[in-house]
Image (cartoon, rainbow, N blue to C red):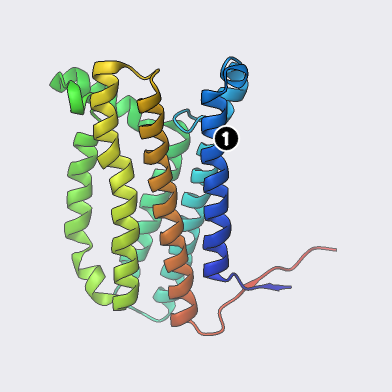
């Protein structure tokens, strides 16, 4: 059996799922009867760990890494210059998936906050070391963006921009609010939902771009499944 995934249809379905997660987040946050039930609230809350929204994001990050390793393998067979870039990106996305589900950055945040005594907009201090790493990656991948097709380059920049705006941009704003007002406010819940939504959309856009790149570079590419009898 062969499977061919239409990038646009994939994008539409994923966006529908994101919308459903946002609705569930606010229903379980704003409706008193649901908000009082901790297990239900925690399962749908977009700011919690190891729940439905986190699982959704983790699976998409793992799908991204799988596609990146696949592209790296295909590029290696064709001896393309960008092979190493695809492989390293795959490793980065595996880390992001693990971080998303286990919240490694929270541990890093606590260590950084104690070391630098950060507060206010840098209360969630993990953004400091992550911003430095992001800068290094951006410098390293400048040449890579010149090697790939212009369309793919634009798609990657847009997807990355959306993801970073959520993961780091809104995180800084949320940090300032959490430091001054706490995390039990409606404003914080809205900021949290917006942050996670941008992260999800950024990854979905990235996956769509990866599928389109695969189909454009390796015409006739498909996924083959051989079910065992």
Q: For this view, does 168 lie left or right of residue 63?
A: left
Image quadrant in which you'd find residue 4: bottom right
Circle 1: element type: helix
Asked if one can make out residue 152 in the rendered structure from this viewpoint, the answer is: yes
Name the residue rendered at 39%, 40% in the picture: 194
Q: For this view, does 167 lie left or right of residue 36?
A: left
| Front residue of 147 and 11 | 11
Asked if one can make out residue 69 in the rendered structure from this viewpoint, the answer is: no
Image quadrant in which you'd find residue 87: bottom left
Mark 1 neighbour density, 10 Å: few (under 14) some (14–19) many (20 or more)? some
Name the residue rendered at 58%, 28% in the picture: 43
Of all residues, the one furthest to the front in this rendering is 31
Residue underneath mark 1 = 24
Name the residue rendered at 49%, 69% in the picture: 211
**Image quarter hosting the C terminus:** bottom right
Tell how many labels: 1
| Front residue of 60 and 78 | 60
Of all residues, the one furthest to the bottom in this rendering is 219
Q: Where is residue 228 in the image (x, y as percent from the top left)?
A: 80, 63
Q: For this view, does 31 lie left or right of residue 202?
A: right
Please tell me whether residue 206 is drawn above or below residue 25 in the rendered image: below
Q: Position of residue 46 (x, y in %)?
A: 47, 33
Please tell me whether residue 55 is drawn above or below residue 211 in the rendered image: above
Q: Where is residue 29 in the image (x, y as percent from the top left)?
A: 52, 25
Q: For this view, does 198 lie left or right of residue 61?
A: left
Q: Position of residue 65 (x, y in %)?
A: 45, 56
Please tell me whether residue 220 is drawn above or below residue 95 in the rendered image: below
Please tell me whether residue 27 is drawn above or below residue 206 in the rendered image: above
**Image quarter hosting the N terminus:** bottom right
Of all residues, the one furthest to the right in this rendering is 229
């Amino acid at each position: 059996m062969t499977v061919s995934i239409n990038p646009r249809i994939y994008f539409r379905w994923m966006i529908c799922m994101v919308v459903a997660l946002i609705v569930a987040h606010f229903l379980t946050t704003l409706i008193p009867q649901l908000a009082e039930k901790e297990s239900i609230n925690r399962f749908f809350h977009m700011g919690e760990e190891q729940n439905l929204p986190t699982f959704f994001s983790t699976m998409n990050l793992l799908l991204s890494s799988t596609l990146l390793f696949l592209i790296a393998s295909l590029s290696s067979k064709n001896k393309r210059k960008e092979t190493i870039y695809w492989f390293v990106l795959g490793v980065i996305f595996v880390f992001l998936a693990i971080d998303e589900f286990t919240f490694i950055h929270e541990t890093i945040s606590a260590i950084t906050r104690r070391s630098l005594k950060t507060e206010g907009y840098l209360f969630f201090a993990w953004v400091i070391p992550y911003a430095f790493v992001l800068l290094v990656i951006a410098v390293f991948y400048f040449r890579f963006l010149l090697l790939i097709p212009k369309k793919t380059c634009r798609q990657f920049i847009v997807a990355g921009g959306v993801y970073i705006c959520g993961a780091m941009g809104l995180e800084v704003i949320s940090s300032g609010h959490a430091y001054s007002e706490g995390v039990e406010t409606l404003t914080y819940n809205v900021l949290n939902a917006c942050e996670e939504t941008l992260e999800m959309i950024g990854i979905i856009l990235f996956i769509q771009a990866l599928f389109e790149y695969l189909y454009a570079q390796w015409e006739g590419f498909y996924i083959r499944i051989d079910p065992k009898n």
